Amino acid sequence: MLRAIMAFFRTGPDRPMMSEDPLRIRRMYEHMRWSVFLSVTLGYGFFYVIRTNFAVVKKPMLDEGIFTTTEMGLIGSAFLAVYALGKLLNGFLSDRANVRRFMATALLLGALVNLQLGSSRSFTTFLVLWGLNGWLLSVGSAPSVVALSQWFSPREMGTRYGVWSISHSLGEGLTFIVTAAMVADFGWEWGFRGPALLCIGAALVLFQTLADRPQTYGLPPVTTYKNDHPPVQQASSGMSVGRLQLEVLKNPAIWILGLSAATMSVARYGINNWGVLYLQETKGYSLKEAGTVLAAYPVAAMIGAALSGLLSDRFFGARRNWPALLTGIVEAVALVALVLVPPGHVILDATILAVFGLSLGALLVYLGGLMAVDLAPKRAAGAAMGVIGAFAYAGAAIQDTVSGWLLDNGKVVESAVTRYDFTPVIVFWIGASLLSILLTLTVWNARAQE
């Protein structure tokens, strides 16, 4: 049984060249490149539809007394801890996998888990199911990046990676607007059921539109097709995938980037997982208002992510250190500004969240994988993504537990109404953002190992 499952997900064998006709190869290559690029960009966004939905339902579930904020923090941490481990292991598996089957199956199973979550009120059951959801959704990013590295050459990678990075913001924006509206109109259960139905459809599409490696279709490697053979790839061309992955683990700069991604994730998932509740509690917004204001963050993050790779490729010679430093500073300043603005300033709140999103979107490209992928052999891109992802979501898991505990510890009950103090939580998020900046500075001159 296990052998059959492994065979199903394993990348296919290389086929002989399908044709010596350059025009035919070009037509097929470009068609499949566009199909793969659109599939991972739009498809990965749906992974976020069934992972950020829990943030939308927190207030209704608190009001019904289903869970406390401490329990919600533990549930969120279970997801993120499992997600971190899954990112690491699935990253290494992605280098050997048929990304079409691997990615589409994970999304389909995650959608089915979310259908069950819409009927669960037990803390233990919810904890287990949300943790399982974390494992399934951890599959999404590494296969996406592996697919990009297989179908796009190194000179194209920064720009394509940046545009792909808008995908999570697409999913978050859809969640904060559409899911919030469904929850407000039909109850918290539809915060899981509605997104699950959308993702079942998306998974079925991915089965048709994603693709395995070019060589499995009788096409040449993308570096040959684009005549783009960097020195690092030439030096490592004779090494096995396992040896290349080991080189990733031996690179100290990748581990430091992982720590920087972990601290960056504290602020990112603070806003993702508690932002709706924060706006309701500290700014006095309704659920729909909070979802709409917070939607400015993922929309701006899409722009920041889409431009980041292109800007660093064109204006910084594919060096990511300067843009990572500048966007890190802007992100921390935006968090401080969000605290200082008093309630009643909707446009200003949305603008600050947009600035936060713009800078964070770029940081997610640089610290969330691109800087590590730049330092890693291309056949071990999944391993590099796995290491970074493991650190990032370990930090996010710690954030959820600490934030939930701080909120529970500082809550006040007046006339049967519970109020939550976000001041210590925001200080925690800002401190982590500053630490992320300092860690990034320590790998300022890191280069890919030949």
Image (cartoon, rainbow, N blue to C red):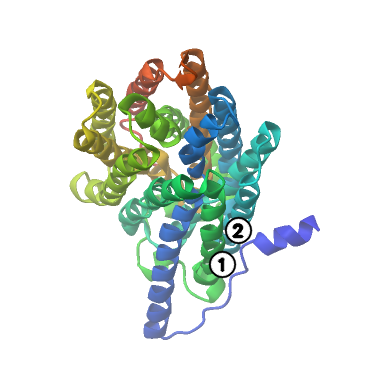
In the image, residue 156 above or below residue 66: below
| Residue 238 seen from this side | no
Which of these two is toward me, 338 or 283?
Answer: 283
Q: Position of residue 372 (x, y in %)?
A: 42, 41
Number of residue marks: 2
Q: CA distance from mark 2 to mark 1?
A: 8 Å
Q: Are marks 2 and 1 in contact (CB under 8 Å)?
A: yes
For the N terminus, the image quarter is bottom right
Q: Look at the numbered disc 2 and give the secondary structure of its residue.
A: helix
Question: Residue shown at 48%/17% (left/top)?
Answer: 406
Location of residue 112 in the rendering, given as x and y in whole percent from the top left corner: 64, 54
Residue 391 appears in the rendering: yes
Crowd rating for badge 2 (residues with CA inside 10 Å; few <14, some 14–19, many 20+): many
Question: 385 and 342: which one is in front?
Answer: 342
Q: Amino acid at mark 1?
A: Leu
Tag 1: Cα neighbours inside 10 Å, few (<14), some, or many (≥20)?
some
Q: Is residue 135 above or below residue 339?
A: below
Amino acid type of the residue that numbered disc 2 sits on in the rendered structure: Leu
In the picture provided, is 33 more to the left or to the right than 63? left
Left or right position of 442 against 127:
left
Horizontal side, residue 6 vs residue 117: left or right: right
- Residue 111 on image: x %, y %: 59, 54
Mark carried by residue 108: 2
Which circle's residue, 2 or 1, is located before the other in the chain? 2
Q: Nearer the viewer, residue 5 or 201?
A: 201
Quadrant of the rendering where the C terminus is positioned: top left
**SS label for mark 1:** helix
Label 1 sits on residue: 204
